[in-house]
Image (tube, rainbow, N blue to C red):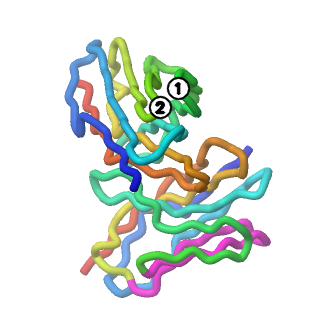
Amino acid sequence: SQTIHQWPATLVQPVGSPLSLECTVEGTSNPNLYWYRQAAGRGLQLLFYSVGIGQISSEVPQNLSASRPQDRQFILSSKKLLLSDSGFYLCAWHGGGGYEQYFGPGTRLTVT
Amino acid sequence: GDSVTQMEGPVTLSEEAFLTINCTYTATGYPSLFWYVQYPGEGLQLLLKATKADDKGSNKGFEATYRKETTSFHLEKGSVQVSDSAVYFCALLIQGAQKLVFGQGTRLTINP
């Protein structure tokens, strides 16, 4: 069966520090991968998605970036965090002929 | 563009009450429709889905029927439990598209 992992689970970082969040999927190949952000008490904002290695589509211009160095690995990065980057970051995958997306457990990021 | 509108929350009910969370959509094509649930501090879980008109999705006592004539996919449960307290998201996926379109989410609280 397929599983999706995210780490770290929680992170507290100062303003101006770099960021690297990692997402990996097991049990499937060539999935579509997605990064979402959820601010406190708010809905989901799609940040990036990828349909293949090295292919990244950005939905919202900001100081975040994404990379997909391997088929089942998706990384969210920032060179300098802002206070507004605080939130709950969710990774998701879609593939295998199904219609639905499956979500990881999330990373809670607090920028201080 | 494609969009999903959910009833505004928060919704507070007593245990064993009947639940309805309204969801309507606007889509240019023929969407598949989903309900996701997010328990506190967790990622999203797929609750149920329907891929064509008049389909009924069901899971864990929840049901939703794909109504093309009213462009709706309302979530219902006959008798809610405290453990149903969560945020519920309605979403659609246009056939051939890569991205889900989410509603803003509805926070549900069930009191004992």
Residue receiving disc 2: A71
Rendered position, B28 above or below B39: above
Q: CA distance from mark 2 to mark 1?
A: 6 Å
Disc 1, SS? loop
The residue at 55%/47% (across/down) is: A95
Label count reads 2
Q: Quadrant of the C terminus of chain B?
A: bottom left
Residue at coordinates 67% horizontally, 50% vertically from top-left?
A: B3
Chain part drawn in magenta: B61-79
In the shown orientation, is residue A85 left or right of residue A66? left
* Residue A66 can be seen, yes or no: no
Q: Which element carries disc 2, helix, strand or loop? A: loop
Q: Quadrant of residue B11?
A: bottom left
The image quadrant of residue B5 is: bottom right
When the figure is inspected, residue B45 is found, relative to residue A32, above or below; the finding is below
Residue hosting label 1: A53
Relative image position of residue A28 (x, y in whole percent): 46, 46
Q: Which mark is residue A92?
A: none
Dominant secondary structure, magenta: loop
Identify the amino acid type marked 2: Asp
Quadrant of the image for the N terminus of chain B? top right
- Residue B76 in magenta stretch: yes
Q: Are marks 2 and 1 in contact (CB under 8 Å)?
A: yes
> Looking at numbered disc 1 in the image, what kind of residue is underneath it?
Ile
Depth order, front residue of B60/B28: B60
